Amino acid sequence: MMRLMGHVALVTGAGQGIGRAIAIALAEAGATVGVNDLNGVSADRTRDELKVAGFRAIAVPADVSDDADVGTMIKTASDELGPIDILVNNAAAPAEMKMLSESTLEDQNAELTTLIGTLNCTRHVLPSMIERRTGRIVNISSIAGTHGMPTRAVYSAANAGIDAFTRAMAAELGRCGITVNSVCPGAIESHRFKARSDGARRNVRQTIALDRFGEPNEIADAVLFLVSDMANYISGTVIDVDGGFTGYLPPRAPRN
């Protein structure tokens, strides 16, 4: 069913993984999609995939942590596709697994770009959304922002900031007819997670109630719901899509 026919969506970090799955889901639901990624080749690949499938899409590579880059990206997407109705802030910096005491200022600033990119992209799409009194913004954060993860202090702080930003913007923009929500993935089978060692993956799996890792399309399903008419009265919500993450290893079964 073409629930989003006539809508224009911009998905950041859509060159692969979760962002790619979101771009595909929105296109399949009828939206025209602007595909952003820092890597222009990756953005082109997702765009080409959508076009081959018969969907309208353009690639708009940009560094979302660079305000001037974001301004150019939003103008290009709007000029070619029309006003942006749906913004999905998915672009994220890789999370370094380090104790804070072992991190450098450069490490810290790099991981904070996830939050900065969300702020930049949101600020640039707002004038048009406010003028038209409509819009859907979905921020992809992480369960690290809710639970806090050892060796990922800055990453956890950045994602907690995204969730707080979500709630603040929902309150600020509600009277303009704009909804703002967060989706917090748990352990998802993205390229980064697949690269972990078997032991690390096994330990993470033991903390998940459903006893499996999520798939990128399962995050995309949550986003699709939040931007659809089925979620007209949902704003300022932070939704965990994590398979029932507990954060604790289960006790070992007693020996016979």
Image (cartoon, grey):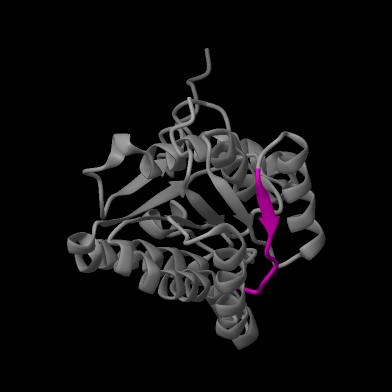
Percent of width and height locating residue 98: 61, 69
| Location of residue 90 (image quadrant) | bottom right
Q: Is residue 188 above or below residue 132?
A: above
Q: Residue shown at 47%/71% (left/top)?
A: 115
Residue 65 in view, yes or no: no
Q: Nearer the viewer, residue 27 or 18?
A: 27
* Up-down relation of residue 254 to residue 21 (above or below): above
Residue 242 spot, x, y in % from top left: 46, 39
Where residue 55 sits, quadrant-wise, is: top right
From the image, give the main secondary structure of the stretch colored magenta: loop
Confirm whether the magenta stretch covers residue 61.
Answer: yes
Instruction: Give the residue displayed 82% in from the left and 60% down from the top.
Output: 41
From where the camera sits, is residue 176 visible?
yes
Q: In the rendering, at what x and y percent does residue 39 appear? A: 76, 65
* Residue span colored magenta: 56-64
Q: Position of residue 8 (x, y in %)?
A: 51, 52
